[in-house]
Image (cartoon, rainbow, N blue to C red):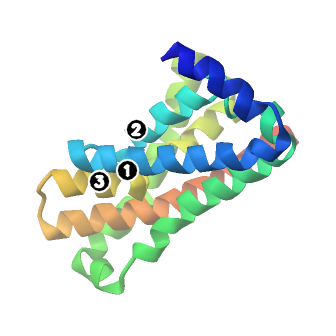
Amino acid sequence: MSLYVDKLVPFVVGEASNTLVIVALILALGVAAQVLADRFQVPSVLFLILAGVAVGPEGVALVTLDVFGDSLTTIVGISVAIIVFEGSFHLKVDKLREAPSAALRLITVGAIVSFVGTTVAVRLFLGADWGISALVGALLIATGPTVITPILAVVPVRDRVAAALETEGIVNDVTAAILAVVIFKLALG
């Protein structure tokens, strides 16, 4: 395996024109991660994280700041936005009507309890300052449809429970992202 990596890395990283090869490899790894996740009936995020670590700086270093330059931040930002807001396309009014009160409680009270509880826990147990604690609390509000949906595909639950969890995952994912950005900006200021 090392022999192939040693030959591939200089070829791929050597020239800026080979950025297309790197992007194609990333897309192929993403598709392979989805196929493996479907095959083994586990959330695809597991294989996506493993693929990311493998090609990142801690792995074979195909995807580094040197390869993409200043555009890496933009690429990551757009990718995160697509992942976060993609779930909202799956939110249907019929699903909301299946368990409206449970979903509303999860979105409001559940999110507030999760935010406050995580913030206080990070502050007390890790000794971080309040700004960092609040940032971690905001980030951990999100359960995310990318995690909830594959779990619900494997674990059988009642329709009302599934509707409430899917709604909470979609809405709180976006809410957590926006809250985290606001808290991050406040912490910097």
Crowd band around label 2 with a 10 angstrom C-alpha radius: few (<14), some (14–19), many (20+): some
Location of residue 76 in the rendering, given as x and y in whole percent from the top left corner: 69, 48
Q: Mark 1 points at which residue?
A: 34
1 with respect to 37 (left or right): right
Residue type at mark 3: give it: Pro
**SS class, disc 2:** helix
How far, Cα to Cα, is label 3 from label 2? 13 Å
Q: In this view, does 104 lie above or below 70?
A: below
Crowd band around label 1 with a 10 angstrom C-alpha radius: few (<14), some (14–19), many (20+): some
How far, Cα to Cα, is label 3 from label 1? 11 Å
**SS class, disc 3:** helix
Location of residue 13 in the rendering, given as x and y in whole percent from the top left corner: 76, 32
Splitting the image into 4 quarters, where does residue 9 fall? top right
Question: Which one is in front, 98 or 115?
Answer: 98
10 with respect to 81 (left or right): right
Q: Mark 3 points at which residue?
A: 150
Q: Mark 2 points at which residue?
A: 47
1 with respect to 184 (left or right): left
